[in-house]
Image (cartoon, rainbow, N blue to C red):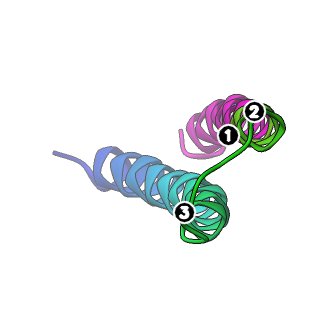
Amino acid sequence: MTNKFLLRWIVILFIFIIYYIFFFFFHFIFQLDFSENMSMGGGFTAAQCHAIAKELMADHDNTAITSLVGFSVGVALILLAFKKIR
């Protein structure tokens, strides 16, 4: 194993770690917001259930956008690392 081989894999692992930290951070924030809504307890009206469902869909969309953008940036950074470390 050469130093370049190890350096490439270290950079790739670092990028993936940063990606997953951001992804789980945003996912946790959305999940925390949902748990605050549900902790109110009691009965929910149909309008409140509809609002909660819309909020969950929006949170899912935000998580999906975060993962797609993060994946795209991660791939670009990995390709840049392979280009710079020859």
Of tags 1 and 2, the one toward the viewer is 2
Q: Earlier in the sequence, mark 1 or mark 2?
A: 2
The three-letter amino acid code for the residue at tag 2 is Ala
The residue at which mark 3 appears reads as 28
> Which residues fall within the magenta stretch?
57-86
The mark total stands at 3
Describe the element under mark 3 as helix, strand or loop: helix
Disc marking residue 46: 2
Q: Is residue 11 above or below residue 48?
A: below
Viewer-side label of 3, 2: 2
At x 84%, y 36%, the residue is 47
Horizontally, residue 39 falls left or right of residue 45, namely left
Magenta stretch, main secondary structure, is: helix
Pointer 1 local density, CA inside 10 Å: few below 14, some 14–19, many at least 20: some
The x and y percentages for residue 72 are 72, 29
Q: Secondary structure at mark 1?
A: helix
Q: Picture quarter containing residue 77? A: top right
Residue 76 location in percent, x, y?
A: 71, 33
Q: What is the C-alpha distance between the residues marked 1 and 3?
A: 10 Å
Callout 2: few (<14), some (14-19), or many (20+) C-alpha neighbours within 10 Å?
Answer: few
Front residue (pair 69, 51): 51
Residue, x 70% and y 28% (percent of image)? 68
